[in-house]
Amino acid sequence: MKKHPAPKVGDTVVLNDNGLAQVFGRSLGLSHMKTLRMKVTQVDKTSLTFPEPTFAVEVDDPEINQYLIDHRCFDIVESTK
């Protein structure tokens, strides 16, 4: 599996197809949701699926945070240095 970069706190992210499928159960017809920009507020330091890197992420959107969503569900739009 290709390694997906984990966002850092403060990064701006959008949902990708994996995120749409996890939150809504599908990605077809939801491309407008890929434009919703969110700021990362927390990234777990411990992988949920060790040794595979899968980190739980929280964003500034409480509706998205209702789902246990990991870093593979987001694409980084703007990274904080």
Image (cartoon, helix red, strand yellow):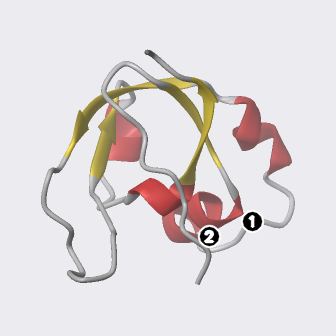
Residue 40 x, y percent position in the rendering: 37, 29
* Among the 4 quarters of the image, the one containing residue 33: top right
Q: Nearer the viewer, residue 67 or 4?
A: 4
The local secondary structure at tag 2 comes to: helix
Total count of labels: 2
Q: Is residue 51 left or right of residue 67?
A: left
* Among the 4 quarters of the image, the one containing residue 17: bottom right
Residue 22 x, y percent position in the rendering: 51, 69
Q: Is residue 54 left or right of residue 1?
A: left
Q: Mark number for residue 51? A: none
Task: Give the residue displayed 54% in from the left and 68% down from the top.
Answer: 3
Q: Is residue 43 above or below residue 20?
A: above
Whole-number angstrom distance, CA of label 2 to CA of label 1: 5 Å
Circle 2 is placed at which residue position? 21
Q: Is residue 40 above or below residue 30?
A: above
Q: Is residue 3 above or below residue 6?
A: below
Residue 44 x, y percent position in the rendering: 17, 50
Q: Is residue 31 left or right of residue 10?
A: right
Residue 63 x, y percent position in the rendering: 38, 40
Task: Give the residue displayed 43% in from the left and 15% down from the top.
Answer: 81
Is label 2 in contact with label 1 (beta carbons under 8 Å)? yes
Circle 1 is placed at which residue position? 27
Q: Nearer the viewer, residue 36 or 40?
A: 40
Task: Give the residue displayed 79% in from the left and 53% down from the top.
Answer: 30
